[in-house]
Image (tube, rainbow, N blue to C red):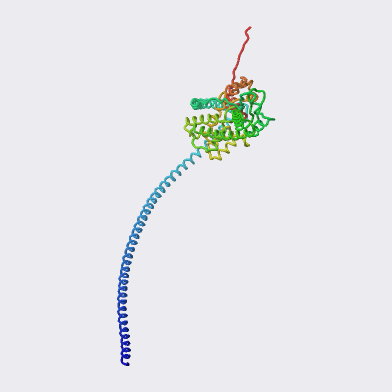
Amino acid sequence: MNNPMISSILFGIGGILIGVVGMLAISKLGLNRAQQKAAMVLEDANRQAENTVRQAVLDGKSQVYELKLEAEKEVKERKMEIQELEAKLSRREDTMNFRDETLTAKEKQIEHKNQKITEKLSVLEKMEAELQQKIDVQIVELERVASMSATDAKKELMEAVEKKMDKEVTAYIRDREEEAKSKAAETARNVIALAIQRYAQEETQERTVSVVGLPSEEMKGRIIGREGRNIKAIEQATGVDLIIDDTPEAITISCFDPIRREIARLALEALIRDGRIQPGRIEDVVNKVTKELNDTMMKTGEETVFKLGIGRIDKELIQLLGRLKYRYSYGQNCLDHSMEVAALAGMMAAELGLNQSLAKRAGLLHDIGKAIDFEQDGSHIELGVKVAKKHGEDAIVINAIQSHHGDVEPSHLISNLVAAADALSAARPGARFESFENYINRLEQLEKIANDFQGVSKTYAIQAGREIRVMVVPEQVDDLACHKIAREIRDKIESELTYPGQIKVTVIRETRVSELAK
């Protein structure tokens, strides 16, 4: 029993020993493999390190070579720059030497000339002294012979010279004026004639009064309404005054604002056609007509711009141009007048080689302030300049607006063309009308200006105030003085009067001799 147990213990101990030996063998085998793998890793690391070092050495050599090349190139360029600078310095030195030699030679010449001048001055001083001595002797002799002092003789001589020079100056001015007038008149006639011939605009027939025709007298009562409520509603909605008098089948619309007057006219016509006239309907029709009129004004402005071909323009300016269709000045339609001015200014600009499109634009916008002058304070020129600046118009266009009535000096030829075209359009027969009182006042002022001049006997304003004929006393005014009087009358008219177009001044001097036979 003990033997089997001992055997079992021995076998167990032997198995343990065998296991321990096996584990030691396996551990040793794994250690050897790890050592081999570590050796391989070290070998690979050494090999990579050697390669990296070798590559770094090659890269360093390459960089050193490139740096060397760049350094050599830079040294070469510096050498070339130094050589060029040396060459420039050498040339500059040669130039300075040449200038030095030239200046030296000139200094010698100047010194020689100064010496000659000094000698001549001394001779001239001697001659002047001798001449003055002789003059003094002659003056004493002349005073003795003429019994007149030198001061009196000088005064008489200056008066004679002044009288002679005055005649010569007047004659010279007359000749130059006639020459300039002949050339300027011919050129201006050609340009204006061409512009007028190429532009034909029918004369405006509408005036400032708006009259609405009625189909019958019974319609007047319907428009007035019960206790006048309809007419009050129309006046309140449109801002106009309706004048219903004894004129058969007609109602007169009165208002300073032409847009309101046109809205009232269109609204009345629409109400008459519809037949339903009562306050609620009146308000609806006025609102509808106002919207339609705004659209019509915009369309009119766009058609005007397109017809003249002046390019892009702001919508607000287009709307204002459409408003000019309903604005009149002295009975002349402002839109038609602006189109005439634009066309004439553009054609004259084309003849003179100027910017035709810009001239048309300036002519079209020269009276743009009249579209709002009945709504805002200020003259139409001030308002027009304000609107043009607001919309970024060209400085030439702004100057044309400012100067077309002479408020400021024109700064460009186009401004002068616009002023001339404005005068042409306004002065055209039938274009405008004026009151009889204003007409008489202008004629009286013209005659009074001319009568104030010395030597004028009679003055007549003819051709509706576009020509003034001045009769002078022949014993007091000679032929040359006539030119002087005409010029002075012209200047005084330009400075004191405001008028459309031009006024011709004609001075007439005639001598009549009569004898009585017995």
Check the picture and name the quadrant holding the C terminus.
Answer: top right
Residue at x-position 60% and y-position 15%: 512
* Nearer to me, 286 or 53: 286
Residue 424: image location, x then y, percent? 54, 27
Residue 155: image location, x then y, percent? 61, 29
**Residue at the top extreme?**
518
Residue 207 visible in the picture: yes
Residue 470: image location, x then y, percent? 61, 21
Residue 58 vertical placement versus 257 (above, below):
below
**Residue at the right extreme?**
227
**Residue at the bottom extreme?**
2
* Nearer to me, 384 or 402: 384
Residue at x-position 62% and y-position 8%: 517
Instruction: Say whether residue 352 is left or right of residue 87.
Output: right
Residue 494 visible in the picture: no
Check the picture and name the quadrant holding the N terminus.
Answer: bottom left
Instruction: Say whether residue 336 is left or right of residue 437.
Output: left
Residue 234: image location, x then y, percent? 64, 32
